[in-house]
Amino acid sequence: MDCHEFVNLMSSYVDGDLALDRAAEWQQHFQHCPECGQFFKSFQSSRDMLRFLKKKPCPIEITKRLHSLVLGQLTRRKEQPAGEGSKSD
Ligand SMILES: [Zn+2]
């Protein structure tokens, strides 16, 4: 299994939709690939947050606040000068 496949199967794995042998392959990749391990962690925490938001009725004020928070972060990131000449790929 490669990283691309790992990411594709992530939500199925979390939902318990993967066949046992696929789930075992998935776990193997997770254990041996630090990058995917890290990605999975952030995936889980954003998922937990979504679950939390779904559980509670989300008042429009909170939605607005979250929205502006996210927008603020995006804008701040854009304002920062990009690394000069260093292409990561
Ligand atoms: Zn990987």
Image (cartoon, rainbow, N blue to C red):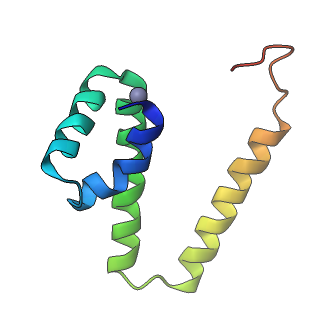
- Residue at horizontal 29 percent and vertical 20 percent from the top: 32
- Tell me if 77 is positioned left or right of 69 in this view: right
* Front in this rendered view, residue 86 or 20: 20
Residue 46 place in picture, x, y as percent: 42, 54
Quadrant where ligand 1 appears: top left
Quadrant where the C terminus lies? top right
Identify which residue is drawn at 35% across, 49% down.
Answer: 10
Where 45 falls versus 28 (above or below)? below
Number of marks drawn = 0
User: Residue 82 in the image: x percent, y percent?
Assistant: 82, 26
Q: Is residue 58 above or below residue 29?
A: below
9 is higher (above) or lower (below) than 26: below
Q: Quadrant of the N terminus?
A: top left
Q: Residue furthest top?
A: 85
**Residue 27, x across and y down, in percent:** 22, 35
Q: Residue at x 43, y 26 (%)?
A: 35
